[in-house]
Amino acid sequence: MFNRLKSTVMGFTQIFKDENEYNEKTIIGFMSFAVMVIFAVVDLVTGYVGKDLVINEGIYNSFVIITLGSFGIAGLEKFAKK
């Protein structure tokens, strides 16, 4: 049990090293996009129920900027030669 937990934690910390196989910008972009999708689903459900979901526009716009920035930078890195 302890070895499995240790390998899981060690695997998670590999993401933050300089040399790894994960693109951190894509991970952050996906998580931000997932939050936006959750906002949309909850807004649809509460609208169907008859309640109005109030989402602060600044917070939602922040998630949009994070998503576009993360995916934009990751895409530019993929297609632009160094």
Image: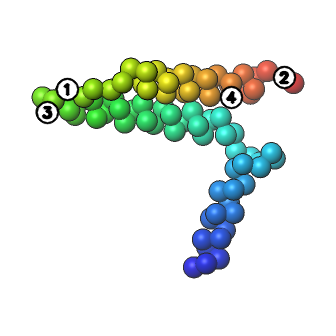
Q: Which residue position is annotated with label 4?
A: 74
Query: How far from the left and from the top, in percent, is residue 54?
Result: 27, 26
> Residue, x 61% and y 73% (percent of image)?
4
Please give the label number shown on residue 52. 1
Q: Which residue position is annotated with label 3?
A: 49
Please give the label number shown on residue 81. 2
Secondary element at tag 3: helix
In front: label 2 or label 3:
3
> Residue, x 68% and y 60% (percent of image)?
11
- As shown in the figure, which amino acid type bears the numbered disc 2? Lys
In terms of image quadrants, where is residue 5?
bottom right
Disc on the earlier residue, 4 or 2: 4
- As shown in the figure, which amino acid type bears the numbered disc 4? Ala
Crowding near pointer 1: few (<14 within 10 Å), some, many (20+)?
A: few
Query: How far from the left and from the top, in percent, is residue 32?
Result: 50, 34
In the visual, does 73 lie left or right of 5? right
Disc on the earlier residue, 3 or 4: 3
In front: label 3 or label 1:
1
Secondary element at tag 1: loop
